Image: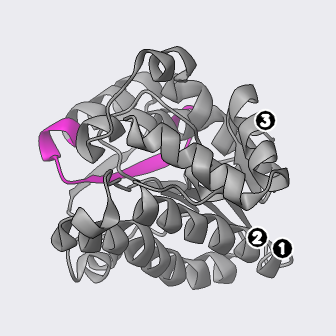
């Protein structure tokens, strides 16, 4: 995963109470980083934190915070400042999905998804990049999705948020290439996390067969980040899907996505 020394440096992981967030935190702590864990559920964060301390002997700070709430990023920055923490690594993992016909969706739910997946991610990245640039070192991993590579009827707004994340991350990778800062986008496919429980997207037998465990997905993201790659799709089948989505006619790709999403 690249020879990056994180000893005595801080990594900030959002959405750190389960799934990919737990794996990101464990991988970074295993490389010597102290970790700030952020999510809404304090009891789950404390359990993750204790495990990291015992396994890796690092410092772990827990911040229970709803990053989708107005004013969440300034509140987070205030807590980091009070603790004297200046992150070298930012993992923007927090995100949520919404499944169903867009016109029938509850606007409050769509708005909350846009706030978390786009606004919070962008605001937090924008706030921490100057700090990293001043230090001459920084690593930012944005968690996108395989859905970023095509329009997805019945997950329309969700896929659009992830297309934004992919575009932003790849652009920042280029902009910051001479500033000592690496930015990458991890694009998972179907992954064993709590995503489906929250989004309302049902798991079929086929989805269960192609689902990846979260650990190798997280490892792929960290490896790409430290290597300086702009983006990575985790998993061989997912890589092939992303490639096909870029070369097939858009009408065909959208129709295929519609059939898949309508059935689930």
Image quarter of the N terminus: top right
| Corner quadrant of residue 112 | bottom left
**Category of crowding for the residue at label 1, using alpha-carbon neighbours closer than 10 angstroms: few (below 14), some (14–19), many (at least 20):** few
- Residue found at the far left of this picture: 43
| Corner quadrant of residue 178 | bottom right
At horizontal 61% and vertical 26% (from top left) the residue drawn is: 216
Residue 250: image location, x then y, percent: 72, 60
Relative vertical location of residue 54 with respect to residue 135 in this rendering, above or below: above
Q: Which comes before the other along the chain, label 3 or label 1?
A: 1
Q: 219 or 116, which is in the foreground?
A: 116
Say the numbered circle drawn on residue 240: 3
Residue 258: image location, x then y, percent: 50, 48
Q: Nearer the viewer, mark 3 or mark 1?
A: 3
Q: Which residues are magenta?
A: 29-45
Q: Nearer the viewer, mark 2 or mark 3?
A: 3
Q: CA distance from mark 2 to mark 3?
A: 23 Å
Q: CA distance from mark 2 to mark 1?
A: 6 Å
**Secondary element at tag 2:** helix
User: Does the magenta-highlighted stretch encompass residue 117?
Assistant: no
Q: Which comes before the other along the chain, label 2 or label 3?
A: 2
Disc 2 designates what residue? 173
Residue 35: image location, x then y, percent: 43, 49
Disc 1 designates what residue? 177
At horizontal 85% and vertical 52% (from top left) the residue drawn is: 247
Relative vertical location of residue 229 with respect to residue 112 in this rendering, above or below: above
User: Does the magenta-highlighted stretch encompass residue 32?
Assistant: yes
Instruction: Determine whether, in the image, residue 248 is placed left or right of residue 67.
Output: right
Relative vertical location of residue 28 with respect to residue 112 in this rendering, above or below: above
Q: 138 or 107, which is in the foreground?
A: 107
Coloration of the structure image = one colour
Asked if marks 2 and 1 touch (Cβ < 8 Å), the reply is yes
């Amino acid at each position: 995963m690249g020879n990056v020394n994180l000893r005595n440096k801080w990594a900030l992981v959002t959405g750190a109470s389960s799934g990919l967030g737990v794996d990101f935190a464990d991988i970074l702590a295993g490389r010597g980083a102290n970790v700030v864990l952020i999510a809404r559920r304090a009891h789950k964060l404390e359990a993750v934190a204790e495990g990291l301390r015992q396994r890796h002997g690092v410092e772990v700070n827990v911040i229970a915070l709803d990053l989708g709430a107005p004013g969440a990023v300034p509140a987070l920055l205030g807590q980091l400042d009070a603790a004297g923490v200046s992150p070298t690594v930012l993992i923007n993992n927090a995100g949520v999905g919404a499944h169903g016909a867009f016109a029938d969706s509850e606007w409050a739910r769509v708005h909350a998804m846009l706030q978390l997946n786009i606004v919070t991610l962008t605001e937090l990245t924008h706030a921490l990049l100057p700090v990293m640039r001043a230090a001459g070192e920084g690593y930012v991993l944005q968690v996108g999705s395989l859905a970023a590579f095509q329009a997805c009827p019945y997950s329309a707004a969700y896929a659009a948020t992830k297309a934004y994340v992919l575009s932003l991350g790849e652009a920042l990778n280029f902009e910051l290439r001479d500033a000592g800062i690496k930015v990458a986008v991890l694009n998972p496919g179907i992954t064993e996390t709590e995503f489906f429980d929250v989004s309302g997207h049902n798991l079929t037998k086929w989805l269960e067969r192609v689902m990846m465990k979260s650990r190798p997905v997280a490892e792929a993201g960290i490896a790409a980040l430290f290597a300086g790659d702009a983006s990575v799709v985790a998993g061989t089948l997912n890589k092939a899907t992303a490639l096909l989505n870029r070369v097939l006619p858009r009408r065909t790709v959208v129709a295929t996505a519609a059939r898949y999403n309508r059935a689930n």
